[in-house]
Amino acid sequence: MTHPPPQSLEAQALLDATVDAVILIDHKGIMQVFNHAAVRMFGYSAEETLGRNVSMLMTERDRDQHDAYISRYLRTGVAHIIGIGREVQARRKNGSVFSAFLSVGRIGADPPRFVGFLQDMTLRHQALQAAQRERERANRYLEAAQTMLVGLDLDLRVTMINRKGCEVLGRNEASLLGTSWYESAIPADQRAELAVQFGTLLEHHPRGPRHFECPVLTRNGAVRQVAWRCVVIEEPQGIASGILCSGDDVTDGRRAEQDVREARERVMHVSRLATMGEMASGISHELNQPLAAITTYAQAGARLLDAADPDLGEARDVYHQIAAQALRAGEIIRRLRSLVRNRTSTRELTDLNAVIRELEPLARADARASDVRVLLELDPKLPRAQLDPIQMQQVVLNLLRNGIDAVQTLSPGQREVRIRTCTGPNGEVQILVLDNGAGIPEELRDQLFTPFMTTKPHGTGLGLAISRSIVEAHRGRLDFEPNQPRGAIFTVTLPASSASGT
Ligand SMILES: Nc1ncnc2c1ncn2[C@@H]1O[C@H](COP(=O)(O)OP(=O)(O)OP(=O)(O)O)[C@@H](O)[C@H]1O
Ligand SMILES: [Mg+2]
């Protein structure tokens, strides 16, 4: 049995203070030094190890080969581990195995001894594995995200793109990484606009993300509309190192919105036509009046001119009357046309009173045909509002027609519908249509605005539904309440112009 060489107190203290496990072996692998850190690492006391072969600290795999390593090294001088270091599997007293980084030095020559320094790698491995797991999880999130994620460097080259991003563009990751984002994905006519967005972002470093829409060009040349949220990626010193963008492909949603808008406009158009149809008898009456007047004036004019000494002043009057009546007929037709023309929605700063006054001839024509008195009570101080005048006329006409229908049960002298404008409690602009008809039965009140709900033999049941959707598109409300002592009040409430956007 080889005895450990005597050690100075300093040397012993030094060894025991070392964080690494230090093990000294002779050329046969017999342990001569086993420091405190080694005791902690392996669970053996120094007494249990000194004088025994170091292979007791190894796993089965290394154990048998260790003596062979040493003798081969002594024979050939070729080092496999000395001066290099490598990771090994080591075995504790309790049989558990752990990873350690082993560096070996040679001491003396004949025969040499070897000193091994071991670092327990368990914690480092755990940390590395945890970091790896974290990275994999982050990657899985990136891949699972139903949002496009794109990382760009300061030259706007792609540094990262997730699966959804590749999917929308119809390209693979490898063909995009490192390429210019403009050239790879942005339609040529959009690049200048995007440059402005990125420029502002990098210049101002806003706290929150910058939101904007910018289309992308897919591999097959299709353009997809994408809503982006972009943030600046900053180094710890606050220096921008790139941009991270997340994008949602909103193409289908935009198309659906457009379809809904178009469908709604078609329905409104049809409904305006239907309203016109119902009003046809009133309208034809209204047109017949000037036409009949024109006929009468023309005949009177002819008679005047047939006279032996025609009164030219009177004849001129007759011509003026004819012109005035023709203008009136033309005006009615112009309003009708503007009401039924198929058109897209607008917003204009509008005087609602003027809009209602414009409707007056049509309203009166319709009312007269049904023997109903229509009263206008327009508030001269009414604020203006942002609205679509034609759509608002359509709402008023729908409400007026309902009112006219509702008072039919009364005797002709009592039938009355009022159209009133006023300022609401919070400065809103209001239009009220009041009638003194039979009112709305309790059981109908919940379904009044449901499309196709009608109690009329020829009703579409769309009037109120469309009116409410128009008013709501103006960020307003259409409400109902009973009138006193009987009848109904429909109230349109619209934000006044200062409170409303476009
Ligand atoms: N002023 C009112 N008084 C009493 N009932 C009303 C009044 N306005 C609406 N209603 C009831 O609400 C129902 C739905 O009205 P809406 O305007 O939506 O359709 P409609 O008038 O029946 O059909 P259309 O508008 O196509 O002529 C009416 O059928 C009627 O029963
Ligand atoms: Mg109606």
Image (spheres, grey):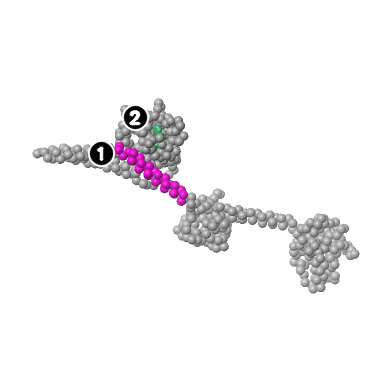
Amino acid type of the residue that numbered disc 1 sits on in the rendered structure = Asn
Mark 2 surroundings: few (<14), some (14-19) or many (≥20) residues within 10 A: many
Q: Amino acid at mark 2?
A: Arg
- The tag on residue 415 is 2
Q: Does 416 sit above or below residue 234?
A: above
Q: Which residue is drawn at the image coordinates 74% and 58% (left, top)? A: 121
First reached walking from the N terminus: tag 1 or tag 2: 1
Based on the displayed image, in which of its 4 quarters is residue 323 positioned? top left
Q: CA distance from mark 1 to mark 2?
A: 24 Å
Question: Residue at label 1?
Answer: 288
In contact (CB < 8 Å): disc 1 and disc 2? no
Callout 1: SS: helix
Q: Is 296 above or below relative to 58?
A: above
Foreground of the two, 87 or 208: 87
Q: Position of residue 188 (x, y in %)?
A: 46, 60
Based on the displayed image, in which of its 4 quarters is residue 133 positioned?
bottom right
Question: Picture coordinates of residue 15 (x, y %)?
Answer: 82, 59
Q: Majority secondary structure of the magenta segment? A: helix
Q: Would you say 492 lies left or right of 101 here?
A: left
Q: Which span is picked out in magenta?
A: 255-282
Find residue 129 and name its label. none
Tell me where residue 322 appears, x and y as whole percent.
21, 40
Quarter of the picture holding the C terminus: top left
Give residue 40's quadrant in the image: bottom right
